[in-house]
Amino acid sequence: MLSPLLDLAGFIALLLWGTHMVKTGIQRTFGAGLRTALAHALRDRVRAFLVGLGVTAVLQSSTATGLMTASLAAGEVVALVPALAVMLGANVGTTLIVQAFSFDASAASPALILIGVMMFRRESSPGVHDLGRVFIGLGLMLLALHQLLELMKGFEHAPSLQLLLGAVSTKPLLDVFLAAGLTWAAHSSVAVVLLVMSLAANGVVPPEAAFALVLGANLGTAVNPVLEGPSGDDPAARRLPLGNLVTRGVGIALALVALDPLSRLVLQLDPDPARAVANFHMLFNVAVAALFLPLLTPYAAILRRLLPHRIDPADPSTPLYLDPAAKESPIVALGGAAREALRLADVLEAMLIDVRDALLKGDRGIISEAKRRDDVLDRLNTAIKTYLTSIDPDDLGPADHRRLNEILTFTMHLEYAGDVVDRNLLAHASKRLKRGLSFSKGEEARLGALIDRLIVNLRTAASLFMTDDPRAARLLADEKVAFREAETSATLSHFERLRSGRTEAARTSALTLELLRDFKLVNSHIVAAAAYPVLERTGELLQSRIAL
């Protein structure tokens, strides 16, 4: 008895870990562009419904789709209405899997894991490395689902199970809870529905009881994202999983009330018990989607009212100056957005200080802290963009439009600079610690001086953002020359070490060269954030770029 339970727990753990790898791999691969890509793909509920259907058909798990979508909705990457539509599509997607499960996708699992491992070992290419996590995760999920299904087949003819099912077959509500508990434990409604099909085909349970078990499987798959979705104290993070659970519950309640006539109707369509179970599963989910899809906007409004955001003043990613009421007066709203944008400069400065400590002092703990700051940068930038784009453009004059675009340009380039710090500079710091490389005193001094120069330039950009002084803009633009000269000098030094045969020194100089290139990129974004808009307005931008 102990061995099957251990197998069940192990396969569930494998499924959860595969889901985690897919989610983190996607987020690391696409980074800041994930929000834009999802917003484009899920811009309306019909498209979102189809996306949920397709993703679930590929992953063979509405539970996995639910867990990932709940995480994205909690991070406000996906709005609530399309996220709810994704869940409705995911529930229909599971019915397609049941209908066409003769094609065993688990055969692709070894190939996916092999491809993923080969990509994951490419540490020199971060994008390929992180995409490898996605392939490994998909392979593990398919493998886990296949093993769960095989494990449940072994219980099909167990005398204790037949006795239990015979006792509860006349109590539909008990059937619902039994199947819900089994689905929650297995993390796969597909496996449970397929087991019910097998039981019905063998006459272990009558059709009406099989249909009630199918309803329970649909309830159980909605329970998992509620229990295992995003954690935290913010009630808003639970909107999607609870909203999906309520839609499942309403649909199940209506189906239980009309279970007898529905059973007769489904059996008339196809008297074969196994096919009847699959058809009932599909018809139920299509009916729930048809019922709730047109009602998602008012339904989402109710969820927002019942589960509001918890504002934590200590959360650095919480906007402080984006007053919704101020949008009635655009000049006040733009002033508040500009104040909020300056907070991005403060966060980016803290990240640069973290990079300096991680590189020169070898502080491992500071790398994780800097990555958290990048998340703050992303959330603040998203909040500012959402706030500014919600202002009625008809209320803005030419000067207001110009200022709005300057704020968007400033925040966009600071977020880009933060992404360079997060993905490149912190990765170099981690690589240095992992490989045990040591900089020479001269390299340490040069790197520290350039980081300090970046911090000074960032402060100049923040000041320029508020003053629009063309003299400061020209001085900031000239800083690109200094960073280009530093890179050129480092390149010549690296080649000299290679020619002299100093292999270890050449390794550190190669790392220094990579760092300087990224410093130059960060500085370019800082210059573009504040200097270029001023120079463009004064007609000096083209001349400045030609000179540089």
Image: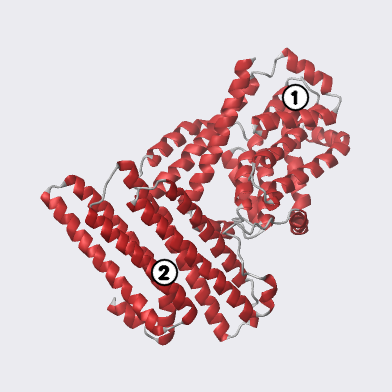
Residue linked to disc 1:
200
- Identify the image quadrant of residue 213: top right
Tell me the kind of residue under disc 1: Ala
**259 versus 5 height, above or below:** below
Measuring 76% from the left and 17% from the top, which residue is drawn there? 162
Disc 1 to disc 2: CB gap under 8 Å: no
Q: Secondary structure at mark 2?
A: helix
**Residue 480 appears left or right of 315:** left
**Residue 409 appears left or right of 154:** left
> Quadrant of the image for the C terminus?
bottom left
**Residue 309 appears left or right of 449:** right
Residue linked to disc 2:
458
Locate residue 542, reporting x and y percent.
Answer: 35, 81
Nearer the observer: mark 1 or 2; the answer is 2
**175 versus 499 height, above or below:** above
Mark 2, Cα crowd under 10 Å, few <14 / some 14-19 / many 20+, is many
Q: How is the image coloured?
A: secondary structure
- Residue 393 visible? The answer is no
Q: Nearer the viewer, residue 529 or 55?
A: 529
- Identify the image quadrant of residue 475: bottom left
Locate residue 177, reporting x and y percent.
Answer: 78, 31
Measuring 69% from the left and 56% from the top, which residue is drawn there? 309
Q: Nearer the viewer, residue 128 or 470?
A: 470
Mark 1, Cα crowd under 10 Å, few <14 / some 14-19 / many 20+, is many
Locate residue 241, reporting x and y percent.
Answer: 69, 46
Tell me the kind of residue under disc 2: Leu
Locate residue 110, reporting x and y percent.
Answer: 46, 31
Determine the CA span between mark 1 and mark 2.
69 Å
Q: Secondary structure at mark 1?
A: helix
**249 versus 371 height, above or below:** above
**Residue 122 appears left or right of 199:** left
> Quadrant of the image for the N terminus?
top right
